[in-house]
Image (cartoon, rainbow, N blue to C red):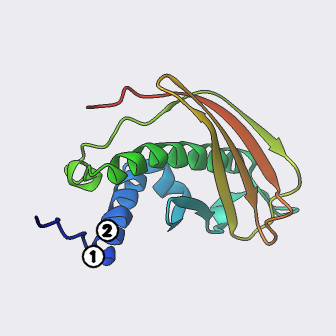
Amino acid sequence: MSRKQPEPVQIVQQRRDEALEALVEGVPYIQFLGIRFDRRGDELTGVLPFDDKLIGNPILPALHGGVTAAFLEVTAIVVLSWSIAWERMENGHRAVDDWRGGHLPRIPKTIDFTTDYLRTGLPRDAYARARVNRSGRRYASVQVEAWQDNHARPFAQGTGHFVMPKRDG
């Protein structure tokens, strides 16, 4: 009795990276802000590279509050969407094959999102990580935290509640 050989780890990693890239590129606002995601295993870190267009108060200078809130919300939605995709990929579904032709999965819809501005966002790169507190068939709750130079000193945090898309098959 022969057992099917597992795929090489490089192939699996490449497929996961392509799936994440397709998910992120499917949202034009993410491209406008320049947000990208660094993947380590199943954990994502949102990266907002500094750009002058992100400054809200040039006198300080400080990141615009709307950019900060959008960065947190986008990170929460992408991490929540990725957690769904990850589960499906682990069960053998090749998400990127479906997503290549623009058939992206439906993303969770925001019910509400609260942002706490803890300190001024400085004119430098920012990072964010989200934690899915609850993800059911209909509803999800996510917390997200953003920092710049020191992960222990976040400059903003947020909590979001989302309506989950209907899962296919």
What mark, if any, has residue 134 been given in the picture?
A: none
Q: Quadrant of the N terminus?
A: bottom left
Q: Residue at x 84, y 64 (%)?
A: 152
Mark 1, residue position:
8
Mark 2, residue position:
12
Q: Is residue 42 above or below residue 91?
A: below
Do the residues bearing badges 1 and 2 touch, measured as CB atoms within 8 Å? yes
Name the amino acid, label 2. Val
Q: Could you tell me if residue 34 is visible in this image? A: no
Instruction: Classify mark 2: residues with Cα within 10 Å, few (<14), some (14-19) or many (20+).
Output: some
Q: Quadrant of the C terminus?
A: top left
Q: Position of residue 59 (x, y in %)?
A: 87, 62
Q: Residue at x 46, y 57 (%)?
A: 31
Q: Position of residue 111 (x, y in %)?
A: 60, 24
Q: Residue at x 54, y 42 (%)?
A: 77
Q: Is residue 20 above or below residue 67?
A: below
Residue 55 image-quadrant placement: bottom right
Near-viewer residue (131 or 48):
131
Q: Position of residue 88 (x, y in %)?
A: 35, 46
